[in-house]
Amino acid sequence: MTVPPEQSGGPDDAHAMPVCVRHPDRPTGLRCTRCERPACPECLREASVGYHCVDCLRQSRRETRQPVTVAGARLGTKPVLVPVLIALNIAIFLFTAVQAGSPTANFRSELFQQWAMAPPPVAAGQWWRVVTSGFLHQGMIHLLVNMVALWIVGRELEMLLGRLRFLAVYLLGLLGGSLFVFLFGAVFAPVVGASAALYGLFGGIAVAAWRLKLNMRPILLVIGINVLLTVTIPGISLLGHLGGLVLGTAATAALIYAPAHRRGMWQAGALAALLVVVLAAMLTRDAMLGDVVCGTLRGETQCVRLS
C-alpha cells in the first residue's frame, strides 16, 4: 500500500510548521488564543477561554489592578520583618549575655553600656543610642514578654501595612519613645527595650481597627492592661511607652488615611514630616542640656555636664 504524496509526513512538514515565538527550534501547531502567536505546550497556560502564552499572562497581570489593603499593601503579604526583628533582638541579647557572662546581668556588658538610651550621652554626640536602645533587653523575662507581643501584634500589622510601611511605623515608635525619654526623662536614667516600638504597634492596631470599623474592645483592653502594668510595675519607662504610642499612632493614621490618589507620595511625605519633628525636638533638647562629656568607667558609661 502506498500513501499519496500530498498526505506524506516527511521531515519537510516540520519545517513548514510555524515555530514557538520563545523557542525557535520547536515547530508547533498551537497558538495563544489572545495574541494568536504560535507557542509550544511549555509556553502555554490554560485560561478561562482557551490557552494564553506566558507573555500575555505577564502583561495581563501588569494591566490588572491588584487588590490592596487600606494602606496600599498587596493582599496576602506574608510577615517577614517580624521574624527578622525577633531574631535580631534575640541575637543581640545573647551577645550581651555572653559578653557580661550572665543572662540575668547582661546590662553589665560593654555593648549594653554603649547602646542604652540616656540623654547625656546622646547630647554628647552618641546619637545611635536613640535607635540601638530599642534592641536591648535587660534579662530574659524582659526579652520574652516583648518578643511574644511583637509576634502577636506585629504579624497582623505587617500584613495590613506592607513591609516598608510596617518598618517605618516600628522605627518611628522606637524613636518616639527615645524622644520622650530625651525630652522629659531623668538625665542619668538609662532606658532600654523594644517596648516603645511595641506601643507604636499597639497604637497602629487601634487606628487600623477604627478605620476598618472592627470591634475595638479587645484592642483597647490589651492597651489598657499594658498601660496599667507600665504604671504599676517599678522600673518601666512610662515616657518611653507613651512616646512610642503617640508616634506609632500618628504614623499609622498617616498611612491608612492617605488619599488613594498618589497614596505613596502622601504617605512618604507624612512619615518624613514626623521624622523631621522628632529630630527637631531632639536638637532643641540637645541645646538645653549644654556641653556633656561621657566616658566609660568600670564598664559603665559616666557623663558630666560642663555647662
Image: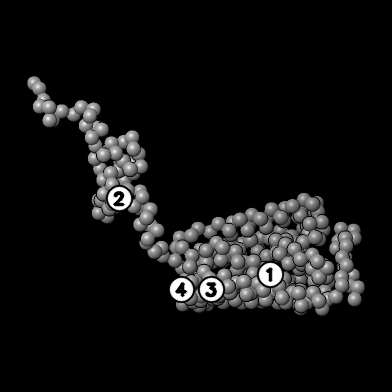
Does dot 1 land on a helix, a strand or a loop?
helix
The residue type indicated by label 4 comes to His
Answer with mark 1 or mark 4, whichever residue precedes in sequence: 1
Q: Is residue 162 left or right of residue 37?
A: right
Identify the disc placed on residue 45: none
Can residue 252 be seen by looking at this rendering?
A: no
The residue type indicated by label 3 comes to Trp
Q: Are marks 2 and 1 in contact (CB under 8 Å)?
A: no
User: Distance between the Cα atoms at labels 3 and 1?
Assistant: 21 Å
Q: Where the C terminus falls, by quadrant? A: bottom right
Q: Is residue 13 above or below residue 118?
A: above
Q: Residue tagged by mark 4?
A: 261
Does dot 2 land on a helix, a strand or a loop?
strand
Q: Is residue 55 left or right of residue 111?
A: left
Answer with mark 3 or mark 1, whichever residue precedes in sequence: 1
Q: Residue tagged by mark 2?
A: 52
